[in-house]
Image (cartoon, rainbow, N blue to C red):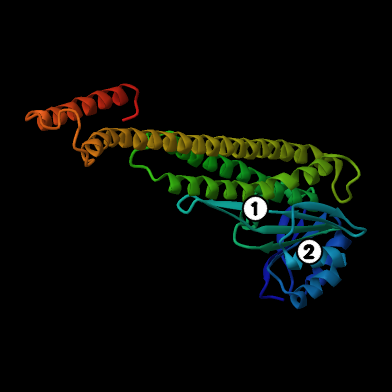
Amino acid sequence: MPGVIVDCAVYREGRRTDCAADFSQALQAARAEGHSFLWLGLYEPTADEFTLASSEFALHPLAVEDALKAHQRPKLEVYDDSLFMVLKPVTYDVEADTVTSSEVMVFVGDAFVVTVRHGEASPLGVVRHRLEEHPEILRHGPGAVLYAVSDAVVDHYIEVAAELQADLEELEAEVFAPMRGRDVRNTAAEIYSFKREVLEFRRATGPLAEPMARLQNPGVPFIHDHARPFFRDVGDHLTRANESVEGLDRLLSDILAAHLAQMGVRQNDDMRKISAWAALAAVPTMIAGIYGMNFAFMPELRWHLGYPAILVLMALLEVGLYRLFKHRGWL
């Protein structure tokens, strides 16, 4: 168990006291004292490693199963002895243009908070440090930790959305740039790849709206009434993030449609050019084909100026057709 414990502390009146080796005793002391709670942070525990914590904190087996397996949608579940919430922090690698999500599970109960982290994209260390600098917030108990974790995750959503918006503007400029010298197949692949990253981002932000709405309303245990306005603020930020994600998705769809239309126009232009050059080649071929037939009686066949006259006629017809096609934009 010690290998997976990232941090363990008891907060008395908002002030940190390190846990003893036996955190079950620390939990009993926190419950006996009042105005105290224990915060246990774990990183990717196995089933055996999580057994002690789940038994000491009386965590529901279904919630424990979700915390161990990970790959959960953001959600909020209420059990008799605890509150279980799943959040999905995200990070955006600007160089690789990839969105990576991890998972944070938060158990909130009577005088305890247990956080379980999966993946690297996690704000828990920063959140704990920031809360310890503001003991007046920690005095509000375990609900304050859930608020702070949710707030950090959602605020980072807005930052990631802004970074995605900046990259989308660059992609949009590339799509509507002149097509000469641009690999249209590579551009289509970039749009599709970007759309997949936005979808990954949406999987983290979209399902969180319903749990956050529940936390704003009365009836959720272990969340005091004075904490609900703070969750309402987080909900407002989440709404902004979801609106940004929806806007990104719509713009990507429009850009992809515009790119496909550009490709269709380009194909039509190419076909017109091919047809025009084929017409230019057909005129001298037709004349030469006629005079290449083995008939004894043909117009001007024995005229000594017939050969240069035919060449001049071909040239005049070619120049005329070329100017006509050029005027119509086919060449």
76 displayed left or right of 3: right
Which residue carries the number 2 mark?
66
Determine whether, in the image, residue 210 is placed left or right of residue 192.
right
Q: Quadrant of the N terminus?
A: bottom right
Which one is in front, 126 or 180? 180
Expressed as whole percent of the image width and height from the top left, the position of residue 231 reads 76, 41
Q: Amino acid at mark 2?
A: Asp
In this picture, residue 307 sits left or right of residue 184: left
Residue ID at (93%, 58%): 80
Q: Position of residue 161 (x, y in %)?
A: 58, 41
Residue pictured at 22% horizontal, 38% vertical: 295
| Residue of label 1 | 89
Q: Position of residue 252 (x, y in %)?
A: 56, 39
Identity of the residue drawn at 76% across and 57% down: 106
Q: Is residue 81 above or below residue 232?
A: below
Q: Can the viewer see residue 141 in this picture?
A: no
Q: Residue furthest left?
A: 304
Considering the numbered disc 2 on the image, is that residue within a helix, a strand or a loop? helix
Q: Residue furthest bottom?
A: 48
Q: Quadrant of the C terminus?
A: top left
Question: Above or below — where is 125 with respect to 313?
Answer: below
Residue 91 visible in the picture: yes
Q: Characterize the local packing of mark 1: few (<14), some (14-19) or many (20 or more) Cα atoms within 10 angstroms.
A: many
Name the foreground residue: 317 vs 135: 317
Q: Position of residue 195 (x, y in %)?
A: 57, 46
Badge 1 element: loop
